[in-house]
Image (cartoon, rainbow, N blue to C red):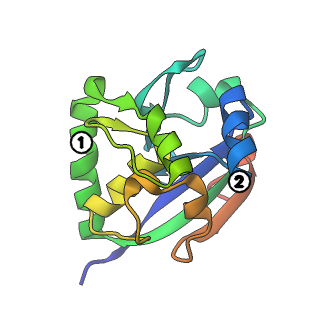
Amino acid sequence: MDADRSVFILLTNTGTLFTKSIQSYTKAPYNHASISFDRELTELYSFGRKHPNNPLSGGFVKESIQTGTYSKFPNTTCVIYELKVTEREVAKMKRVLNIFIRSRQKYLYNILGIFGIVLNEPIEFSNSYFCSQFVAEMLQRSGIKLWDKLPALVTPDDFRQCGRLRLMYEGKLSEYDPAREP
């Protein structure tokens, strides 16, 4: 029997123009999703801004809650969820993640995929993802199926509504203290 482990899903709202545009349609409190393998969020991955000052330059990114985009937006609000997984599922996720890391230059941000959500029609391109599509893809490729929908139709709010995730923290990202959280 595999020992229990956890991965962490971080949903954020930076308050940027791009986020506000998405939020005006979704009405959801958080519009960006990332996945981490530790509660300190030091191993944090997603699809988003490659350069904090340029919202148009996006792709696969290793994020930091202390530097980069989040440091430019200190009032970022967030919610952090814990998902119980097995050692084997974590190993599969890390293998998938290593493919992304090794080929990170070839990945693009799937901006058209966001319109696919609006149309409820997946718009997928090779080597192109948006944030929640990437997190859902990581989970699905590791054998974890949280929804009966394609990763290209998964939104950050789908994570918020998922009963398998345990709420760990909600508030300002800059005030998150992993040592204080249960």
Q: Position of residue 178 (x, y in %)?
A: 62, 55
Q: Quadrant of the N terminus?
A: bottom left
Would you identify the image quadrant in which residue 60 lies?
Answer: top left
Look at the numbered disc 1 and give the secondary structure of its residue: helix
Q: Which residue is mark 1?
A: 98
Residue drawn 54% across the image and 54% down it: 155
The answer for how far apart the CA atoms under marks 2 and 1 are is: 31 Å
Q: Amino acid at mark 1?
A: Asn
Say if 33 sits above or below 81 in the image: above
Residue situated in front as seen by the camera: 93 or 181: 93
- 136 left or right, relative to 67: left
The image shows residue 34, relative to residue 55, as above or below, that is below
Q: Is residue 22 left or right of residue 84?
A: right
- Amino acid at circle 2: Ala
Q: Kindly state the secondary structure of the residue where label 2 is placed.
A: loop
Occupied quadrant, residue 75: top right
Q: Residue at x 36, y 70 (%)?
A: 145
Q: Is residue 160 above or below residue 1?
A: above
Asked whether residue 14 is in view, the answer is: no
The C terminus: image quadrant: bottom right
Give the crowd class for mark 1: few <14, some 14-19, many >=20 residues within 10 Å.
Answer: few
Residue 105 position within the rendered picture, expressed as x and y whole percent measured from the top left: 28, 23
155 sits to left or right of 93: right
Query: Which residue is tagged 2?
Result: 28
The residue positioned farthest toward the top in the image shown = 53
